[in-house]
Amino acid sequence: MMPLLIARLTLQEAVRRKLVWVVLLLSAVFIVLYIYGFRVVVDDVEAFNAQRGGAPREIIPREVQMSVMVMLGLWTVNFLAGVMTIFAAVGAISSEIEAGTLHVIATKPLSRWEIIAGKYFGFLAMIVIYIGLMFASVIATARLVGDYTPPNMLTGLALMVLVSTILLSLTMLGSTIFSTMANGVVIFMLYGLALTGGLVEQIGTSLDNDTMIRLGVASSILVPSDAMWKLASYKVQPAIAVSFTGPNPFGTIVPPSDLAVRYAIFYCIAIVLASVFVFQRRDI
């Protein structure tokens, strides 16, 4: 099928880009620093407990400390994946229109929906591979260095993939409407809006401020990426860590519902269909 061929070519083209390699290099640096930092935290915890002379209780339970380290790692992975998704797919359609290469492709017996589908699934494959490798690196570090394994790992991984899938869908739509530069600015601002809205909602939850909570919910309806991250972070934390840390920029004590997940999936489908609709009617 032509979409699969385009997906393979899109994935190959993405791998050849310098941006992707820069992100991979930064990701490798992060993993090295993360392993070192996790080792330091574990050593400090063990040294502190030894100095307490066998006191029956820790000030902060070890499970909470390890969970916090995992959350910091996964939050960074989520952010890096989001940035890579946006800037890898930012010119999926617009850059080829600007370069004139799409004129050649579009004149062949190839439907425009096949172009959208092929490019979308090519970038999606890249996202799944990247997040899977980075997620596994964080979990392996927690297991080997901290002797800690978080719960619901597959659910958390799937939700993190959904976060970047939302951003990919928006980026593809923007690429059929805006120029490459304008698309990058618009989508990155929407990504920032989602992150800010999630933070506002957490502050509102802490202060019991209904207005701030409503603003956060509104932002999650507009761009549900941060809501899916909040749910992912909730799922991969033990109950003791959620109650101990409370509302914070990396997690939540009031996770989104299953309805929010269904909405996010429908959101992705609707945005991709909108991309096809707009591209079908765009004069290239």
Image (spheres, rainbow, N blue to C red):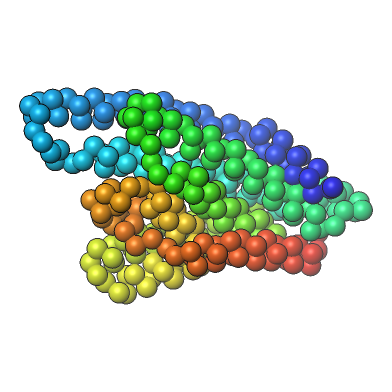
**Coordinates of residue 265 in the picture (x, y in percent):** 58, 61
Evaluate whether residue 202 shows in this view: yes
Residue 127 in which image quadrant = top right
Task: Using residue 33 as the reference point, say whether residue 26 is left or right of it.
Answer: right
The answer to whether 190 appears left or right of 176 in the picture is: left
Q: Residue at x 23, y 51 (%)?
A: 244
Front in this rendered view, residue 102 or 266 = 266
- As drawn, 182 above or below 129: below
Out of 52 and 211, give the one closest to the viewer.
52
What residue is shown at x 79% (from left), y 58% (from top)?
113
Decide if residue 34 is in sight here: no
Which residue is located at x 91 percent, y 51 percent? 108
Question: Which quadrant of the figure has residue 171?
Answer: bottom right
Residue 261, position as x, y percentages in the image? 51, 62
The image shows residue 242 at horizontal and vertical percentages of 29, 52
Q: Nearer the viewer, residue 181 or 151?
A: 151
Q: Could you tell me which quadrant the C terminus lies in?
A: bottom right
Q: Residue at x 79, y 67 (%)?
A: 281
Q: Report x, y in % for residue 164.
A: 55, 50
Left or right, residue 36 beside residue 161: left
> In the figure, is residue 113 to the left or right of 220?
right
